[in-house]
Amino acid sequence: MSKPLAERMRPKNLDEFVGQKQLVAEGAVLRNVIESGQIPSFILWGPPGVGKTTLASMLANMLKRPYYALSAVNSGVKDVRETIAKAESNRFFNSPNPILFIDEIHRFSKSQQDSLLGAVEKGTVTLIGATTENPSFEVISALLSRCQVYVLKPLDKEDLIGLVNRAVKEDVHLKSKNITINEYDALLKYSGGDARRLLNSLEIVVNQFQEEDVVIDNAKVGEIIQANMALYDKTGEQHYDIASAFIKSIRGSDPNATLYYLARMIEGGEDPKFICRRMVISASEDIGMANPNALLICNAVMEAVKNIGMPEGRIPMAQAAVYLASSPKSNASYMAIGMAQAMVRETGNLSIPLSLRNAPTQMMKNMDYGKNYQYAHNHENNFVAMEYMPEELAGQKFYEPGNNGAENKIRTILRDKWKAKYGY
């Protein structure tokens, strides 16, 4: 079976590499490092399909280094240790360090990243990590301090069109056809700036033509690609559609639909941190004060997934998703902060009441900063009915408790304290 077009077009040297001139052009930093032959461990940070994997394998080939590759999606500590042991046993006296490439290194848990430290520190392997996430947040500091970080930029339109034209002209299969490209926009749109997806899309479109003459335009590309789209595309439109369906199922209190869309995302390779972040947001936006524990649980699940990794991380994620969908709902806090921000934009920097101002110096005290402030804990039930709003907003209400058990109690408490002031 023939290799995919993206694999057939994989560059073999730096001169064939598309984009990233700031790193690989003549005199650029990474090219100088490679040509010196003394490469440190480093991390390639950039969006999907800009050449991270290609650069790592090409580098190993250019330097004639043994090359081991692992994916953080389906590798654990055991795999890392076995690979390091294999690299160590195959290394001969004065031979160069093998290269260990870890794709999506940001998905490794702390313990998985810890398992790399010794080998990197001793020089058993030269680590090259690839990540789409900011390594400052996703890679442990001990490992990050031992690595250079190189940032890869999204491919621009000129790079992508050049890649298509080169494939049509040079690929062994495509050049046997008479291919005319009248429009590029749809191909670029469906690629999302990802060179691999761009070449895959081009190959799918060309393969739909039985005849030797192939004419490609936006309408034809749209028709063919739509019919061949994967069930879940974590970087494309369905990424947002399924995430939206997931959140709306939580909001609609349907745990079964919630689990279905969670499974769609997990099976599609979605980043677990993205899923956890969406649940944290939903815990405040859709549940809020109706069940404040929801936010605590989602934060705990995010930390648990970070520590244990996948696939086991799906279990606490499922627990949190069911908890959110089954919880009472309130968007009162979400609506309240929106109203408060709108008021700030409308009224600007209103004067803070003197009684609430900080008074660290005698001069400020002489200007009545802090004067007449009443310390709530010195009063009965730790409450005193003084004015906290700027004068122009006295009596303005932003928070309207929802109609649920927890917030009905809050409404009663606020009514008892503030009487008719805020209309509770």
Image (cartoon, helix red, strand yellow):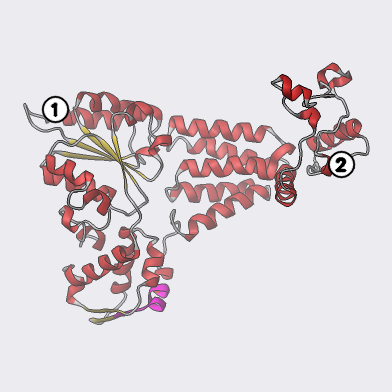
| Start-end of magenta stretch | 215-223
Mark 2, secondary structure of its residue: loop
Q: Residue 221: say if magenta.
A: yes
Give the label on residue 286, or none: none
Give, as a three-letter code, the residue at label 1. Ser
Residue 34 drawn above or below residue 153:
above
Judge from the rendering whether residue 299 lies leftward or rightward of residue 266; answer left or right. Answer: right
Q: Are marks 1 and 2 in contact (CB under 8 Å)?
A: no
- Residue 252: x, y in percent? 68, 50
Q: Residue 371: say if magenta.
A: no
Q: Please rate how many residues cluster around mark 1, counting C-alpha atoms within 10 Å: few if below 14, some from 14 to 19, many from 20.
A: few
Residue situated in front as seen by the camera: 209 or 399 = 399
Residue situated in front as seen by the camera: 311 or 393 = 393
Q: Which mark lies nearer to you, 1 or 2?
A: 2
Q: Residue at x 50, y 47 (%)?
A: 263
Judge from the rendering whether residue 193 lies leftward or rightward of residue 333; answer left or right. Answer: left
Residue 75 quadrant: top left
Residue 215 quadrant: bottom left
Q: Residue at x 68, y 47 (%)?
A: 253
Q: Please rate how many residues cluster around mark 2, counting C-alpha atoms within 10 Å: few if below 14, some from 14 to 19, many from 20.
A: some
Q: Residue at x 34, y 38 (%)?
A: 105
Task: Single out the residue that lies furthest toward the top.
Answer: 378
Residue situated in front as seen by the camera: 151 or 193 = 151
Residue 254 visible at all: no
Quadrant where the image shows the C terminus:
top right
Q: Main secondary structure of the magenta part?
A: helix
Q: Residue at x 37, y 67 (%)?
A: 188
Q: Which residue is mark 2?
A: 395
How many numbered callouts?
2
